[in-house]
Amino acid sequence: MSIRGAAHIAGVYEHPGRHLPDTSLALIHAEVAIGALADAGLTVGDVDAYFCAGDAPGFGGISFAEYLGIDNVSYTDTTETGGSSYLIHVGHAAAAIAAGKCRVALITLAGKPRTGGRRPGGSGNVSTAPEFGFETVYGTSVLGLYALAAQRHMYEFGTTSEQLAEIKVAASLHAQHNPRAFLPNPVTIEEVVESPLVSDPLHRLDSCVITDGGGALVVVHPDIAKDLARHTIPVLGHGEALKHLDAGRIDLTHTGASASGPRAFAEAGVTPADIDYASIYDSFTITVLETIEDLGFCAKGQGGVFVSEGGLVAPHGRLPFNTDGGGLCNNHPANRGGMTKVVEAVRQLRGEAHAAVQVPDCELAVAHGTGGSIATRMGSATLVLGRGEG
């Protein structure tokens, strides 16, 4: 069963806060839920499906359906793949809507890593994972693992620190137009490569920000979408993939996007060349570089050349990306950047991005999320979204 056009994203909301010491995790979930429903022109009473991931405390969907006052839940999904969970939720919601299981799905994310929540990389039951005794106890870290992938990419393809820095520069040029961006000031290639080396070859400015906050999405049946005053965005394609160590035979230069991307593009009936805008998960600059290659925007090993000379800068770069500043500069709520990737893709397709970075005639967008680590095991998810009718 294809989900092409089977559901529309009707509402999106990104929490305006980046430092929320006096707001509870539950309240952040509630605030983003209300915001996304208001954006769609719907209410809690319209919701009949609820989706959340491991960031939701308590019994997850059970606890938060009650907390949010959703009385008629006929479908729930608590799939947990780290930062990519929310893109997977969109695909699952579209499939559930197509199957007649629900008509209005609410997806929420919230976290407080800046003010007492889970530390970066601390999601999931790490201490009980089967790999724990073979990896974590020996001092591996999220940063170190991504640096390992970057080092391998440099060794195999000649990628340079300056090319990785181009990604941060592009994100910062976009963030300057976002009044809520955590890091709103543009940076240069020199400033990136001269920032402290935190895990060779990655510098401090190669890393994402750490922010409190959250976001929410509302996915609806096309019959509901056509009756809403809001511009809704059809879901055209969805792909997901799990990639792991394969008993030690992992290729550090590839991500799960090499499988999830082709699935999403095939379902949508488009190619990477058709895409006008891309929201790419950007936990680190190397994450973006490898993902761009694996999604097919350039050949493997050519990512460094592709991003050079403003290739990612909106509105006229080869592939305008992360026009809100992304996780590198704007917001990485709960250490899970997938939600904001969908939000900004919807803004672009609605023509609601900042005028300085709005892609002209944006008809097709891709949003991609990465959960876990590109150097070990990950859950990848890709969405292809269309502009639809305004």
Image (spheres, helix red, strand yellow):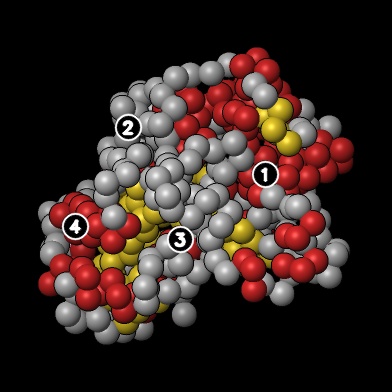
Observer-nearest of 10 and 173? 173
Residue marked by disc 4: 34
Observer-nearest of 197 and 287? 197
Q: Position of residue 361 (x, y in %)?
A: 36, 36
Residue marked by disc 2: 180
Choose top left, top right, bottom left or bottom right for residue 59: bottom left
Q: Which mark is residue 87?
A: 3
141 is higher (above) or lower (below) than 73: above
Disc 4 + disc 2, Cβ < 8 Å: no
Sequence-wise, the earlier of marks 3 and 1 is 3
Q: Amino acid at mark 2?
A: Arg
Q: Amino acid at mark 4?
A: Ile
Sequence-wise, the earlier of marks 2 and 3 is 3
Kindly report the distance in space between the C-alpha atoms of the residues bearing marks 4 and 2: 19 Å
What secondary structure is found at the residue carrying circle 2?
Answer: loop
Kindly report the distance in space between the C-alpha atoms of the residues bearing marks 2 and 3: 23 Å
Kindly report the distance in space between the C-alpha atoms of the residues bearing marks 2 and 1: 26 Å
Sequence-wise, the earlier of marks 4 and 2 is 4
Residue marked by disc 1: 143
Horizontally, residue 352 falls left or right of residue 124, namely: left
Q: Nearer the viewer, mark 4 or mark 3?
A: 4
Do we see residue 277 in this rendering?
A: no
Q: Nearer the viewer, mark 2 or mark 3?
A: 2
What secondary structure is found at the residue carrying circle 3?
Answer: helix
